[in-house]
Image (spheres, rainbow, N blue to C red):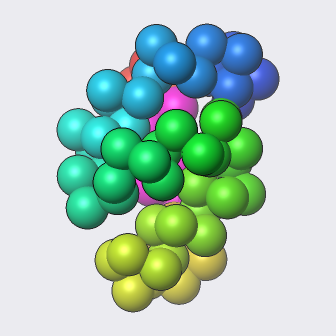
Amino acid sequence: MNWDRIEGNWKQFTGKVKEQWGDLTDDEVAQLNGNREQLAGKIQERYGCEKDEAERQIDEFAARQ
């Protein structure tokens, strides 16, 4: 699935995002509002990974949806 569809249906995907990245708070997920770059930033911040790793995780997440 492409990210535009995920972004457009963000409220439906928030539970799946929380399953994937459980360290993100409900407020953080809600504030992201489907913004891929902000999600990558939060993943980097919470999990201490590089931008490339965060992007890879997001790509895998989107591919499974």
Work out whether residue 27 or residue 38 is closer to the camera in this orientation and state it.
27
Residue 1, image x, y percentages: 60, 18
Is residue 19 rendered to the left or right of residue 63?
left
Predominant SS along the magenta part: helix
Bounds of the magenta span? 55-62
Height in image: 57 above or below 1?
below
Q: Is residue 47 visible?
A: yes
Q: Residue at x 23, y 52 (%)?
A: 22
Label total for image: 0
Q: Residue at x 46, y 67 (%)?
A: 43
- Quadrant where the C terminus sits is top left
Q: Is residue 2 visible?
A: no
Q: Residue at x 36, y 44 (%)?
A: 26
Work out whether residue 59 or residue 26 is closer to the camera in this orientation and state it.
26
Residue 52, image x, y percentages: 60, 74
Q: Residue at x 53, y 84 (%)?
A: 50
Q: Quadrant of residue 6?
A: top right
Height in image: 53 above or below 24?
below
- Would you say residue 29 sits in the magenta stretch? no
